[in-house]
Image (cartoon, helix red, strand yellow):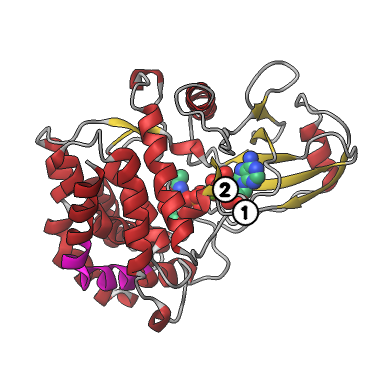
Amino acid sequence: MSTATFSISKIQNIAKNFAIEGDIESAKPFGSGHINDTIFIKNAETNSPDYLLQRINHHIFRDVEGVVVNIARVSAHLDHKLNGEFKTENGVERVLTLIPTLKGSLFFKDEDGNFWRMYHFIEDSVSYDLVSSAKQAYEGGEAFGRFQRMLADMDATLLTETLPNFHNIKFRLNNFYQALADDVKGRVKEIPEEIELIKSYEEFMCSLYEMGQAGKLPTRITHNDTKFNNILFDKNDRVICIIDLDTVMPGYVAYDFGDAIRSLVNTAEEDEADISKINVNMSLFKAYTEGYLKEAGNFLTPEEVESLYLAVFLFPYMQGIRFLTDYLQGDTYYKTAYPTHNLVRTRSQFQLFKKLWSHKSEIKSIIEAEQKVAS
Ligand code: ADP
Ligand code: GN1
Ligand code: MG
């Protein structure tokens, strides 16, 4: 899938269906997400807010209403917590605000069958594709730990499982082997080393799934897309908001830990083609783990703490499999900028996995040590 572009008149036609204030001065593509299309809308009136318009990828999120209702329910719960027991004196943390349509719906369907939603734009915020300081990592860890803690008493049955099996490694492996068998683009011949790696770590990688199947891991409400750039910071690196709530649904806490670590500790971009640039920054790992366990350590079971370690390796491995499956299937899922983009991403994720694997014992010790401090 390549990135879509929209004319200003198209955006104006969409935007006028939402209950926004003021007039549109300009609209431009925004962010680096792989799934949805995001457009920043600058308000012509200086005293009116700016907005973020998103086209939801309905080929992936088939139940769009389920997605936006999940976001609204989770945001209402978080808002209540941030104004109640989690209120801090100088707190800057806030929640996403969905702007309804003039008819009171949380999304708008246009005449081409596209689905749109509108948010208040959170001003003076920044997100990081590459993390540079331990403070950012610590604050991010704390924010995701607090996110899970604030949602711990929310009734999970209120949420729709919008993408079933999203982090189920058996499901991802099955899809991969199917794509391998189909070989619709004739690309299997390019990936013997990747196939070898996938097969040789398969058993280890299924251990988190097996723990879940054995009833050792409680299901909680999790974010499920904790890529580090889904946190908005202010200029002092305090967390303003956790965004991209499309995949909020029941899951295991380890999912959120593993995906955050995958995107945080990498010294290179997720799609770095020169794999010699890919290394693991262990001080960021330590800082994130410290912040995360400070918030979440008290309510996690010993098995959940054990599962965090497994997720650190599972997530780059599974992400590599997802990119590779898309490559084999002809690049229909993730946005790509060039023909081998998904293959490059796969190799970069597998390199990250190998680097993490070489830090195995250190990773285990840090989690254990930080959990002792936290509990
Ligand atoms: P995707 O699912 O495509 O990743 P996101 O919801 O993460 O889409 O949004 C893409 C980018 O837009 C984010 O990385 C962030 O930089 C920015 N962003 C998203 N929501 C907001 C918001 N409410 N205010 C300001 N910036 C935002
Ligand atoms: C997608 O939308 P974005 O870019 O935040 C994907 C995540 C992947 C990520 C990899 C719904 O997230 O699961 O980890 O790309 N989201 C979906 O960069 O598949
Ligand atoms: Mg995102």
Lower position in the chain sequence, tag 2 or tag 1 = 1
| Point 29% across, 56% down: residue | 176
Q: Quadrant of the C terminus?
A: top left
- Residues at badges 2 and 1 in contact (C-beta under 8 Å)? yes
Residue under label 1: 126
Q: Quadrant of the N terminus?
A: bottom right
Spot occupied by residue 269 in the image (x, y as percentages of width and height) = 48, 69
Residue 195 lies in the magenta-colored region: no
Q: Please tell me whether residue 3 is drawn above or below residue 10 in the rendered image.
A: below
Task: Give the CA separation, mark 2 to mark 1.
Answer: 5 Å
Q: Quadrant of residue 297?
A: top left
The amino acid at mark 2 is Leu
Label 2 crowd bin: few (<14), some (14–19), many (20+), radius 10 Å: many
Disc 1 C-beta below 8 A from ligand 1: yes
Disc 2 C-beta below 8 A from ligand 1: yes
Q: Please tell me whether residue 365 is drawn above or below residue 196 in the rendered image.
A: above
- Report whether residue 259 is seen: yes
Spot occupied by residue 25 in the image (x, y as percentages of width and height) = 88, 44
Q: Quadrant of residue 164?
A: top left
| Point 60% across, 59% down: residue | 2
Residue under label 2: 232
Please name the predominant secondary structure of the magenta segment in the image.
helix
* Stretch of the chain drawn in magenta: 349-363
- Report whether residue 222 is seen: no
Q: Please tell me whether residue 204 is drawn above or below residue 168 in the rendered image.
A: below
| Point 13% across, 36% down: residue | 213
Q: Is residue 222 left or right of residue 240?
A: left
Residue 359 lies in the magenta-colored region: yes
The amino acid at mark 1 is Val
Spot occupied by residue 56 in the image (x, y as percentages of width and height) = 58, 39
